[in-house]
Amino acid sequence: MTSTTITTKGQVVIPSEIRRNHKLGAGTRVVFVEIKGEIVMRPITKEYFENLAGVLPGKGKAARSLLKEREADLRKEENR
């Protein structure tokens, strides 16, 4: 188990081994979720959005829209 410290700005460093194992790089967006009193950080990926499909009414339209938006963001980042 690896530990880190929260800075005065609320920032933490994700240990390099974890970044490598989960392919987390600069610019990777993440979401924090509270589950039964624990804080879970999850990368925002296509799979993350696919798992959300059907949670809200609308037959996955919101998730598809978010996926398209994320893909457009990735294209913009790649073209920098």
Image (tube, helix red, strand yellow):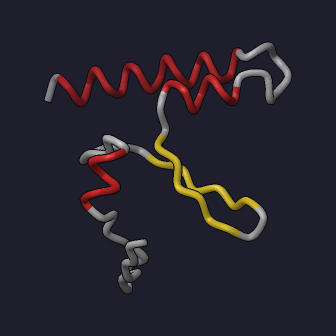
Quarter where residue 55 is shown: top right
Question: In percent of the image, x 74 and y 70: which residue is there?
Answer: 37
**Count of picture labels:** 0
Question: In percent of the image, x 64 and y 23: which residue is there?
Answer: 63
Residue sticking out furthest to the front: 1
Q: Seen in the image, is 17 located left or right of residue 12?
A: left
Q: Seen in the image, is 35 located left or right of residue 44?
A: right
Q: Seen in the image, is 53 located left or right of residue 74?
A: right
Question: In percent of the image, x 73 and y 17: which residue is there?
Answer: 60
Up-down relation of residue 80 to residue 68 (above or below)? below
Residue 56 in the image, given as x and y percentages of width and height: 81, 28
Residue 41 in the image, given as x and y percentages of width and height: 53, 55
Up-down relation of residue 35 to residue 58 (above or below)? below
Question: In percent of the image, x 24 and y 47: which residue is there?
Answer: 26
**Of residues 59 and 25, which is closer to you in this image?**
25
Q: Quadrant of the C terminus?
A: top left
Residue 47 in the image, given as x and y percentages of width and height: 54, 26
**Of residues 64 and 46, which is closer to you in this image?**
46
Residue sticking out furthest to the right: 57
